[in-house]
Amino acid sequence: MTKKIYEKQSYLRELTTVVTENTCEDGHIYVKLMETIFFPEEGGQYSDTGVLVYGDKKVKVIKGELIGNASESETDIRYLVDSEIPVGSEVRCELDWDQRFSRMQNHSGEHIVSGLIHNLYGYNNIGFHLSDDEPVTLTVDGKLTAEQIRNLEIKANEAIYEDLPITDSYPVKSELSSIDYRSKIDIAGQVRLITIGDPAAPLDICACCAPHVLRTGSIGIIKIISSASVKGGTQLSILCGKRALEFTEKNIDNLESVAKNFSTHRDNVPDLVANLKAENRILKNRLSEAAERSILSEIKDDGPGCIFTDIELSPVSMKNIFNELVLRKEGYVGIFSGNDENGYMYYAGGRDLDARELAAAMRDKLSSKGGGSAGMIQGRTSSSQDEISGFWVETCPIILARKGK
């Protein structure tokens, strides 16, 4: 079995070892090593990458993966590489350290957050994913309020300020039942526990196979980016360390850019945005009322049953126009607000007609979404103006003929 040096020496960046196996499967080359500093893809975390220096040649380590029977604790590690290396060759492993350290910061930060959630609110982590491109996500089996999440972020960063030790241990099976640790899944082989803080009064103890930083201070900062309610629980998105710093810098730069464009201080931006939204709402209502008056004045008894406008009409204006169409015209009528690119909002129906039959046909022919009553339906469709007009000319008469109208 490959000796997992990364478990006890997570900061080791280089290692000289020997290739013990070289195989080729479906055109892919795999090697096994006597010892390794490359963590494989396991436990929700991506594999380490790096190179194997063989003489004057650098062989790229693309991915590490577990092989064998996990249920019987007979797993080993092999690495996908881009070139063959003879068995017995001595190689120098060079780890992609920046990538590894970033992952350790974020994984150790996730342990802190998950441990605090368990300690403070009694919830368990039921899902975890560490990505290099997106925030780390963790899902717990309970609902967290906005106030609890704010408190959680404060407590998590206080744990960083305390610079607590992060240690691993390998208790025997008989000891595990007396240890209060998270992630008590059925593991066939040796369980590795990661402890944050004093083992006598830990912040967290969790079963984990991945490398971690040695002290919480190395995480630097923990930032909860967002939260979302999921079935039966809450999903948090977090960033830690350098990635959290880069996220913060980017958002401050964006805020400064907005403030500069409006010649104000960034502290004033929230009130500025609120005022702009209020002004925009007033202007939209005025535009909608003006468009309503114009449309109403142009309705003709012998005109088309459906009317289109590219102006965003308010619900009140949509309803007023629809009511006028129903009074003036026989058959089904509709008012559509929008454009072909973004789709149309609509109010539709007909005098003495069941609008729900129209809704069923629109769902079938126009992929519309919405609902309503026999008197009126409303919703949205992504169909084009030509498609909607064609429906009104071709399909609406068929529905009316079926009803004997």
Image (cartoon, rainbow, N blue to C red):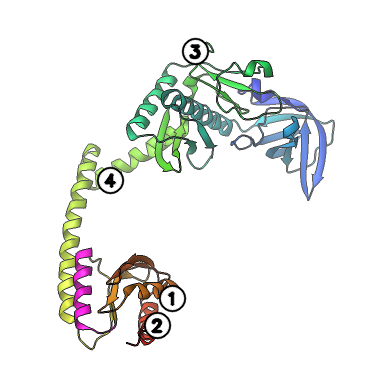
Q: Quick check: 277 above or below 242?
A: below
Circle 4: residue type: Val
Give the residue at x 40% y 39%: 227
Residue 201 counted in the magenta span: no
Total marks shown come to: 4
- The alpha-carbon separation of the residues under discs 1 and 4 comes to 44 Å
For marks 1 and 4, the one nearer the N-term is 4
- The alpha-carbon separation of the residues under discs 2 and 4 comes to 50 Å
For label 3, the crowd category at 10 Å Cα-Cα, with few meaning under 14, some 14 to 19 and many 20 or more, is: few
Local secondary structure at mark 1: helix
For label 1, the crowd category at 10 Å Cα-Cα, with few meaning under 14, some 14 to 19 and many 20 or more, is: some
**Do the residues under discs 2 and 4 have CB atoms within 8 angstroms?**
no
Residue that badge 4 annotates: 258
Residue that badge 3 annotates: 201
**Do the residues under discs 2 and 1 have CB atoms within 8 angstroms?**
yes
Circle 1: residue type: Lys
Local secondary structure at mark 4: helix
Tag in front: 4 or 3: 3
Q: Quick check: 356 above or below 25?
A: below
381 displayed left or right of 114: left
**Do the residues under discs 1 and 4 have CB atoms within 8 angstroms?**
no
- The alpha-carbon separation of the residues under discs 2 and 1 comes to 9 Å
Residue that badge 2 annotates: 395
Residue that badge 1 annotates: 365
Considering the whole magenta stretch, tell me its main secondary structure: helix
For marks 3 and 1, the one nearer the N-term is 3
Q: Quadrant of residue 263?
A: top left
Tell me if residue 385 can be seen: yes
Q: Which residues are magenta?
A: 314-331
